[in-house]
Amino acid sequence: MKNEIITYSVNKTTNGELYISVQNGEVSVRAPWYITQDKIQKAVMAKRNWIMKKLEEYKEQANISLKPIQILGITYNLKVTYKNIDVIECDLEKNIVKVNLPKKYKKIDHESMTDILIDKLYVKIAEREMEDIMEETRLMVGFAPEDYKIVEMKNVLAMCTEDKKILINPRIVKYKREVIEYIILHEFCHLKYKNHTKSFYNMLEKYMPDYKKYEIKNIKY
């Protein structure tokens, strides 16, 4: 850190005193027009320790997860920033999921926090996406389950219960929408046919003739 070069921008003004600030990982200097570059450099070096501390704080606040995540078949990187806020904020931008976390979450190791964030994000997206897909499927087949719930399940993306309810794993939103639509139709067919009988597959093929290309191996539904 001692040998690290500090880069900065200079904004000359017609009045006021020399002022150094660090914002968003960048160092800027505001100085009167008559201050020479040599004096500006000396002022920066005099505040070197303070500047390096601020730059390190910024680096700690923003991290890119090494583990990309899938959302509706698209790969995103996860950018985590810690701020003085009370609730988690999340936004999708191009191929990055930007998440703002309360600073209290810094006590949790980054890998565990990434897993927690992914779970919360999948639940949020599933709540938004599944309402439309369930309604579209209902209109297509002409009937509906007693209810549906989004719940975490191990190695199961969706299932039909004995009491005619459909349970949906929020991680279903990792896959493309066509795959999700197939899985939900699969569970609707189970509302009429408990087992994978010929009648079951006839119904599945009736509403989705190319369903086989959307099947996922080693995953239950």
Image (cartoon, rainbow, N blue to C red):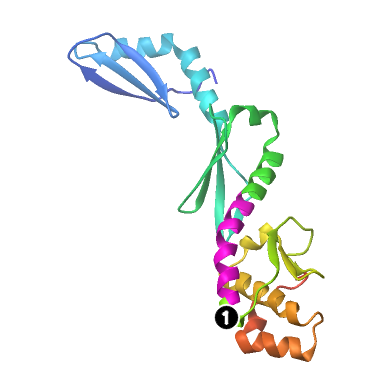
Residue at x 57% of width, y 70% of height: 135
Q: Is residue 152 magenta?
A: no
Residue at x 46% of width, y 14% of height: 48
When asked about the image quadrant of residue 140, the answer is bottom right
Residues rendered magenta in the picture? 121-138
Is 34 left or right of 24, judged from the image as shown?
left
**Number of residues whose C-alpha sits closer than 10 Å to that of mark 1, classed few (under 14), some (14–19) or many (20 or more):** few
Instruction: Tell me if residue 72 can be seen.
Output: no
**In this view, which residue lies farthest toward the left?**
14
Residue at x 55% of width, y 54% of height: 76
Q: Position of residue 30 (x, y in %)?
A: 29, 17
Q: Label 1, secondary structure: give it.
A: helix
When asked about the image quadrant of residue 150, the answer is bottom right
Q: Is residue 128 magenta?
A: yes
Classify the position of the C terminus by image quarter.
bottom right
Is 74 left or right of 38, judged from the image as shown?
right
Q: Position of residue 60 (x, y in %)?
A: 57, 29
**In this view, which residue lies farthest toward the front?**
146
Above or below 32: residue 204? below
Q: Amino acid at mark 1?
A: Met
Instruction: Tell me if residue 37 can be seen.
Output: yes
Is 105 left or right of 74, judged from the image as shown?
right
Q: Is 2 in front, or is 50?
A: 50
Residue at x 77% of width, y 64% of height: 156
Residue under label 1: 140
Q: Position of residue 12 (x, y in %)?
A: 23, 19
Q: Is 103 in front, or is 59?
A: 103
Report the magenta stretch's main SS.
helix
